[in-house]
Image (cartoon, rainbow, N blue to C red):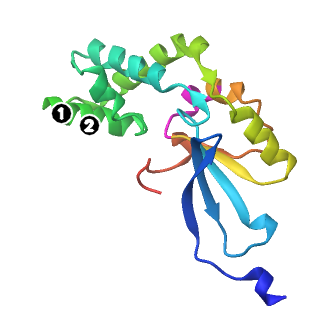
Amino acid sequence: GGQDRMSYLPVAQHDYYDGRQIGYSIMASSRAPDSMAFLFDLDGTLVDSVYQHVLAWREATQAAGIEMPVWRIHRQIGMSGGLMVQAFLREVGRVVSAEEMDRIQRTHAQAYERQAESLRVLPGSCELLAELSARQVPYAIATSGRTGNANRALKLLNLSAAVPVITRDDVRHAKPDP
């Protein structure tokens, strides 16, 4: 008995599928089959949507008179919209009102929605999620994006309603805060 359920410290690690990083696994404190779960990021991990976000942020910043090279925008992808705009503003030494901050984020959301038809599921994503479901391995999807932006990408994955999805709207502080 006791050796089969040897305890380990909780560990998060990168996981790979067909040689491609697909997310993080969270290992529980035993070797029991039900002790493993996966947490996947959405944009750039399961769905090819990073460049659509980059171009939407470029449009939003330009509309606000903030000139940001695309490469600088790209390196900030993964942050919540508010943190990203704050990072852009620090880089250009500009301060904006809360109203202007909201307008920039709304412009991004509208620009991203116009590009939504070009979103694609990354190869192997649906198959991997289907295999996890078939094996009854729990998983969840998390994104620093707002629910409205995430919904189109999530629909492409054909997820069961039972799959937990956590968006920026569900948490008080965006990553890097837990």
Residue at 75% in and 41% down: 129
Tag 1: Cα neighbours inside 10 Å, few (<14), some, or many (≥20)? few
Give coordinates of residue 122: x percent, y percent.
62, 28
**Which labelled disc corresponds to residue 91?**
1
Residue 29 percent location from the top left of the image: 67, 75
* Direction bottom: furthest residue: 2
Q: Is residue 119 magenta?
A: no
Residue 150 within the magenta-colored segment of the rendering: yes
- Local SS, label 2: helix
Circle number at residue 141: none
Circles 1 and 2: CB atoms closer than 8 Å: yes
- The three-letter amino acid code for the residue at tag 2 is Ala
Q: Is residue 73 left or right of residue 177?
A: left
Instruction: Give the image quarter of residue 11.
Output: bottom right
Q: Which residue is mark 2?
A: 87
| Residue 81 position within the rendered picture, expressed as x and y whole percent measured from the top left | 40, 33
Between 80 and 72, the one nearer to me in the picture: 72
| Drawn side of residue 18 relative to residue 89, left or right | right
- Residue at coordinates 60% horizontally, 12% vertically from top-left? 117
Q: Is residue 94 visible?
A: no
The quarter of the picture where residue 82 lies is top left
CA separation in Å, label 1 and label 2: 6 Å
Q: Please name the residue shown 62% across and 56% down the image.
A: 25
Q: Which residues are magenta?
A: 144-151
- Location of residue 58 by image quarter: top left
- Tell me how many marks there are: 2
